[in-house]
Image (cartoon, coloured by chain):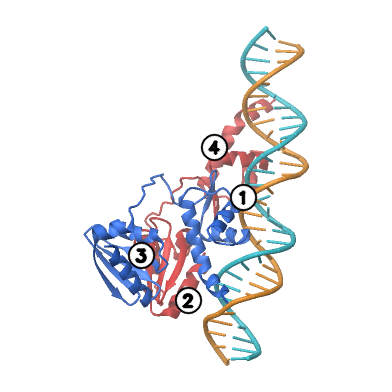
Chain colours: A blue, B red, C orange, D cyan
Amino acid sequence: MQYIAFLFMSKTARHQAILDLLDDGPVESQDLLQHRLERKGFDVGQATLSRDIHELKLVKGPEGYRRASKNLGTEGVLPSVMHLAREFVVEIRQAQNLLVVKTTVGSAQPVAAALDASHWPEVVGTVAGDDTVLVIATDKQKAHALARRIRELS
Amino acid sequence: MQYIAFLFMSKTARHQAILDLLDDGPVESQDLLQHRLERKGFDVGQATLSRDIHELKLVKGPEGYRRASKNLGTEGVLPSVMHLAREFVVEIRQAQNLLVVKTTVGSAQPVAAALDASHWPEVVGTVAGDDTVLVIATDKQKAHALARRIRELS
DNA sequence: CGCCTACATGGATACTTATGCAGTACATTG
DNA sequence: CAATGTACTGCATAAGTATCCATGTAGGCG
């Protein structure tokens, strides 16, 4: 039944969604969070949110829930993946489910940050050095698709 | 009556005392805080503490109440994996034989170092960025087992 | 002094969050 | 396939926190 896919995707996706919501500012209560998630298509109970919040190590201050180490309101909006890719990506190679993205020297970090922020489902995570970003995809196929997508942005 | 002096000194002094207490580590609940303050000579109700906490803009995370800006200083000694995992690891995702460990911003390096230092047989190696550690395991199964083990540390 | 206003506080209680338990969906193993 | 284990979840409810209301005190002022 379709529950399968739903359940499987759900938790991680929901976590992502929660973090996204929090990037728009703190959320007062679990109830409010529940309703916002609902509007985003996540139907989940308060109990689960309590658990999610614990797992994500969120913190509740006077303003509500927010990410633990999110300090200094440096709300520098990061540039779009498209812009960054076009500007700094030099080459993309694939090795199994991994992509090695070569960038101009010093640009790997911002590119990785942008890829993370885009929350593409194929991207499990990224690690950046100085001129290289390692992108971890769920599997070979996704990695390939992802490579194409990034190339197309250029 | 001495109530005068008591009442007059109280609020500010109590606030100070609360901050002092928190410097020794987070406090789980208002109840606990109440008892600790009592031992220090402050006799105060839960309602008042709720207000104090708000006024001091304290923050409640998984560990309890703490000061908002507390930026956990990780000094020279390499803390145990357990401690680091519990403190900084936010999420663990698996992609094939790799684990993508998300940490709070800036903590990836120390977490990776700790994982390396633990010399677990499943860990082939690690690479750390800013908020992401890539852990390479020998195979899918080991990766899965490893993920569980790290999660259990929390 | 008598009166008024502003605070600080505790008790009771409304409200919010955490958790024990049980059920569902797989995954793995024999 | 049956048996067992793991992950995830909701419901009911326990545990924890915030707030309404009443009280007591201090300071200002005519």
Spot the residue most to the front.
A152
User: Which chain does the residue under circle 3 lie in?
Assistant: A
Q: CA distance from mark 1 to mark 4?
A: 18 Å
* Residue identified by numbered label 4: B16
User: Which chain does the residue under circle 4 lie in?
Assistant: B
* Residue identified by numbered label 2: B145
* Residue identified by numbered label 1: B29
Q: Residue at position x 55%, y 71% from top?
A: A7
Q: Which element is circle 4 on?
A: helix
Q: Earlier in the sequence, mark 1 or mark 2?
A: 1
User: Which chain does the residue under circle 2 lie in?
Assistant: B
Residue type beneath disc 3 = Thr
Q: Which element is circle 1 on?
A: loop
Residue type beneath disc 2 = Ala
**Residue A51 higher or lower than A141, as above or below:** above
Camera-side mark, 1 or 4: 1
Q: CA distance from mark 1 to mark 3?
A: 37 Å
Residue B133 pos. (x, y %): 38, 65
Instruction: State if disc 3 and disc 4 touch (CB < 8 Å).
Output: no
Mark carried by residue A126: 3
Q: CA distance from mark 4 to mark 2?
A: 46 Å
Q: Residue at position x 48%, y 56% from top?
A: A19
**Residue C10 higher or lower than A144, as above or below:** above
Residue B20 pos. (x, y %): 53, 42
Instruction: State if disc 3 and disc 1 touch (CB < 8 Å).
Output: no
Q: Which element is circle 3 on?
A: strand
Q: Nearer the viewer, residue A98 or A39?
A: A39
B145 left or right of C25 in image? left
Residue type beneath disc 1 = Ser
Q: Is the same chain shared between marks 1 and 3?
A: no
